[in-house]
Amino acid sequence: MSSFLAIQIVLKRLTSAEVDRIIEMAWEDRTPFDAIDFQFNLKEKEVIHLMRSNLKTSSFKMWRKRVTGRKLKHGFPDKKTRFKSTNQK
């Protein structure tokens, strides 16, 4: 099975509310990809695919430019930590 097909299968199980929350977390500067993986079981590659398929091309390019090489997007302080935005219920 190709990795593209595997990613599609993983993303289909998400609700629209979960997709919205993942996009919000991905845009946040201080939320690492590991936190998204911890909450939604999505690896960085899957988050990138989700962003590409749900954002306009210009928005996706702006986001990729922003997060590429950013230290804060690639760290996770403690696996026991629960990341929850004040917007999340």
Image: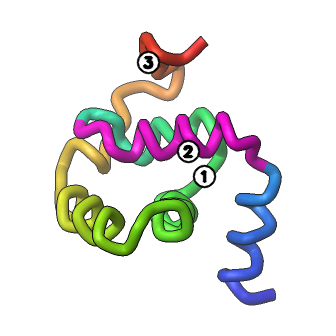
Magenta stretch: includes residue 58: no
Q: On the rendered structure, is 31 left or right of 65?
A: right
Residue in view at x 23 percent, y 64 percent:
62
State which region is magenta: 14-29
Residue in view at x 60 percent, y 52 percent:
42
Give the main secondary structure, helix, strand or loop, of the magenta stretch: helix
Residue in view at x 54 percent, y 17 percent:
88
Q: Nearer the observer, disc 3 or disc 2? A: 3
- Label 3 vs label 1: CA separation? 18 Å
The spot of residue 25 in percent (x, y) is 42, 37
| Count of residue discs | 3
The spot of residue 27 in percent (x, y) is 33, 44
Residue receiving disc 1: 42
Residue receiving disc 3: 85
Res 15 → quadrant: top right
Q: Residue furthest bottom?
A: 2
N-term-proximal mark, 2 vs 1: 2
Identify the amino acid type marked 1. Leu
